Amino acid sequence: MLVIDPDECIDCTLCVAECPVEAIFAEDDVPDDQRKWTPLNAELAKVWKPIIEKKAAPPDADEWAKTKAKAHLLEK
C-alpha cells in the first residue's frame, strides 16, 4: 500500500493514470465505498517515509492486486 500526502498533492491527477491497480482517484471521484480510506491515507502520509525514487514492484504485487479483503492486514 502506498499513500499520497494530501498536503503535498497539487491535485494534478497524473498519479491516477499511473496506478497499475486503479486504486487512486481524483478527490471528487472517490467512490463512496472507498471514502473510508481518505482519513487513513492522510494519517499514514504523515508517518510513512516518502518514496523519492522509482522502485521495482514486489514480486508478489500482482497477487496482492487481486486480493480485495486485506484491510485487516494493515499495520500502523
Image: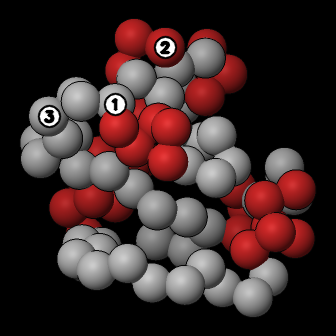
Query: Gap between marks 1 and 3, in whole Å?
Result: 8 Å
Residue 70, percent across and down?
Answer: 78, 59
Q: How busy is the neighbourhood of tag 2: few (under 14 within 10 Å), some, or many (20 plus)?
A: few
Q: Of the numbered discs in the image, which one, if any, rests on residue 29?
A: 2
> Is residue 65 visible from the viewing direction of this image?
yes
52 or 46: which is nearer to us? Answer: 52
Quadrant (top left/top right/bottom left/bottom right) for the N terminus: bottom right
Task: Give the structural element (helix, strand or loop) at label 3.
Answer: loop
69 or 5: which is nearer to us? Answer: 5
User: Which residue lies under the disc numbered 1?
Assistant: 13
In the image, what residue occupies the spot 32% across and 51% down? 4
Query: Gap between marks 1 and 2, in whole Å?
Result: 11 Å
Q: How busy is the neighbourhood of tag 3: few (under 14 within 10 Å), some, or many (20 plus)?
A: few
In the image, what residue occupies the spot 49% across and 48% down? 18
- Which amino acid lies under the numbered mark 2 shown in the image of this protein? Asp
- Which amino acid lies under the numbered mark 1 shown in the image of this protein? Thr
38 or 15: which is nearer to us? Answer: 15
Q: Is residue 36 above or below residue 52?
A: above
Left or right relative to 26: residue 10? left
Residue 17, percent across and down?
Answer: 50, 38
Query: Gap between marks 3 and 2, in whole Å?
Result: 16 Å
Task: Give the structural element (helix, strand or loop) at label 1.
Answer: loop
Q: Of the numbered discs in the image, which one, if any, rests on residue 10?
A: 3
Residue 43, percent across and down?
Answer: 30, 52
Q: Is residue 51 above or below residue 69?
A: below
- Which amino acid lies under the numbered mark 3 shown in the image of this protein? Ile
